[in-house]
């Protein structure tokens, strides 16, 4: 199957996420930031584990900067 230069570039970017631990970490942090931002914008709480207990954080208390 032939691929375009754009598709090859996307494949290379994805492969770099698998092999470079710093790229993986950056991708995970970005995904978490986007998920937290989305919850805050939609007015949805999040749940975290803190001091051995489940804690619900209301959307107005979610501390997150707008993703890039």
Image (cartoon, rainbow, N blue to C red):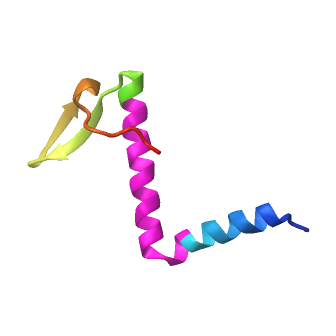
Q: Residue at x 30, y 34 (%)?
A: 46
Q: Residue at x 42, y 62 (%)?
A: 26
Residue situated furthest front in the rendering? 68
Residue situated furthest top in the rendering? 43
Q: Residue at x 43, y 42 (%)?
A: 67
- Magenta-colored stretch includes residue 53: no
Work out which quarter of the rendered image holds the N terminus and state it: bottom right
Q: Position of residue 40 (x, y in %)?
A: 35, 29
Task: State the image quarter where residue 63 is shown.
Answer: top left
- Which residues are the magenta region? 17-39
Residue situated furthest left in the rendering? 51
Left or right relative to 9: residue 40: left
Task: State the image quarter where residue 41 is shown.
Answer: top left
Q: Position of residue 31 (x, y in %)?
A: 45, 50
The image shows residue 18, relative to residue 49, as above or below, that is below
From the viewer's side, name the closer residue of 55 and 59. Answer: 59
- Magenta-colored stretch includes residue 32: yes
Q: Residue at x 25, y 24 (%)?
A: 60
Left or right relative to 53: residue 2: right
Helix, strand or loop for the magenta stretch, by majority: helix
Q: Position of residue 36 (x, y in %)?
A: 36, 38
Left or right relative to 25: residue 47: left
């Amino acid at each position: 199957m032939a691929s375009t230069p754009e598709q090859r570039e996307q494949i290379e970017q994805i492969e770099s996420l698998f092999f470079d631990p710093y790229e993986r970490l950056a991708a995970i942090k970005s995904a978490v930031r986007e998920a937290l931002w989305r919850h805050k914008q939609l007015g949805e709480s999040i749940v975290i584990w803190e001091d051995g207990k489940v804690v619900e954080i209301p959307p107005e208390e979610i501390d997150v900067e707008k993703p890039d």
